[in-house]
Amino acid sequence: MERKMTLFGLAFPIFVENFLNKLLTMVNVYLLARLSQDAVAAIGVANQFLNFITMTFSFVTFGTAVVIAQNRGAGDEKSAGLAATSAVVVNVLWGLLIALVLAVFHKPMLRMMNMEGILMDYSATYLLIIGCCCAVQGLNLTLATVLRNYGEAKAPMMVFLIMNVINLAGNACVVLRPFGLPDFGITGIAVCTVLSQVIAAVMMVACAIRAKIRLELPRPFPFKIMGQILRIGLPGAGDSIAFNVANICMTYFVSAMGPTALAAQTYAVQFIAFVQVMGYSVGQAAQILVGYHCGARDFDRAYKLAMKNIWVAMALNLAVMTVIFIFQKPLLSLFTDSAEIAQMVFWCLVVDFILEFGRPFNLVVGVTLRGTGDVMWAMWASVLSTVFACILVGYVLTQVFHLGLYAVFIALLCDEWLRGQLMTYRWRTRKWEKYVIIKDADAA
């Protein structure tokens, strides 16, 4: 465990993996900007639904991470293996069901977000193609989670690196049209994304086989272990649900401000995503280690590890945010020359700079708290904070006082700070120790 599962050994590959995913999204936005600002605005809306779909896979992946980590910490490799294989089966089936729903309802969903005309055409095409292949994404996310919890964090990192290179090359061909290629437009961008994900899925399966993780369907199906996964994963993903619902609501508020505000929000969110990935990587690595220590009943080590890494995540987040804030003009000039958009993005980043002092409490303590099995507190804290500190405040500031785009980020700030402090309070009480799924008798 000490050789493979160290904070840096886990966090660095997770950081690279997530950084590459954010880079992929940023490159897509850059290429879409070469098509039109309407394309950027439309895809920004479609991505809210795609992000929500990705979040639904976390019901299983989050619970799987906790069950694998705690069982491995207790020395029960058989149960850890059953958790891995059952998670793959369930998430692939869930992805197929989501694809069916999107095939039928993608346009009504987009109409709820005030999409019409060319914006509807762009967003509907993009959402339909990528959404209908989301079972592949579910497979990739699940196998990446399994590999990381077996100490193989470098494997998904390399797979996502290759996936991003393929996607980048394909999208560049669609937009730049070398060798007289026809204009595939939004359809081409979406198809390239799906193709890169399919290739990544094949490679991810190969990595799992190489790591000797059995992927065949277990018989009989381990419903007891799947029940443990869902008991942790369903409420444990409450934070992600709340966050994604809040983002959809915020995008709805912004959509009433027009396509310029939507484009500015898309650019600001893409910049901020690179800040989040630092603390997120530390939090994910800390969750794996805390889960392992909890499975081994070493609660003092788990407690100290989480508290220490709040400050690590904060230092990393603020360092990246400072760089982005200083170089925001040249960075934004890669995407647009609109002075109005640049002004909007500036004030969004000002607000987010303050937000970053509170985000690490969520990214580290919030994640590790759920990783112990204490998921109900985390779920209700997230839901209440999102409803009252984010959605309600966002509605009042944008729809009542009409303060503009930066008001959305003020609402996000209120939510992030309140949620983070609620999670930290719970961690300090150490009541989470009694929710660990591996009891003394099991660990023995």
Image (spheres, rainbow, N blue to C red):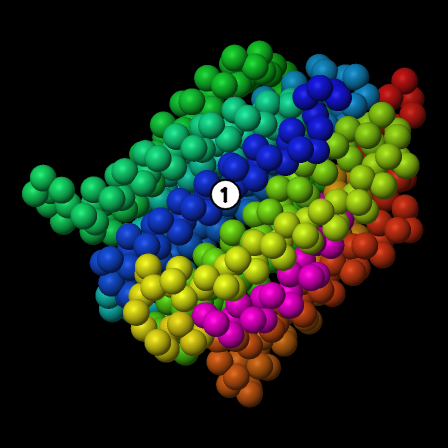
Indicate left or right for 244 with 360 as reference.
left
Residue 441, image x and y in percent?
91, 22
Could you tell me which quadrant the N terminus lies in?
Answer: top right
Q: Secondary structure at mark 1?
A: helix
Q: Residue at x 45, y 28 (%)?
A: 159
Q: Which residues, given as a range, are shown in magenta?
A: 345-367
Amino acid type of disc 1? Phe
Q: Which residue is mark 1?
A: 19
Q: Residue at x 63, y 76 (%)?
A: 393
Residue 203, image x and y in percent?
42, 22
Q: Is residue 430 above or below residue 259?
A: above
Residue 91, image x and y in percent?
53, 34
Whether residue 399 is in magenta: the answer is no
Indicate left or right for 72 with 62 as reference.
right
Residue 384 placement: quadrant: bottom right
Magenta stretch secondary structure, dominant: helix
Indicate left or right for 150 with 187 as reference.
right
Is residue 154 or residue 265 the one in the foreground? 154
Residue 386 placement: quadrant: bottom right
Q: Residue at x 68, y 21 (%)?
A: 4
Question: How many residues crowd mark 1 within 10 Å: few (<14), some (14–19), many (20+)?
Answer: many
Whether residue 354 is in magenta: the answer is yes
Q: Is residue 372 above or below residue 424?
A: above
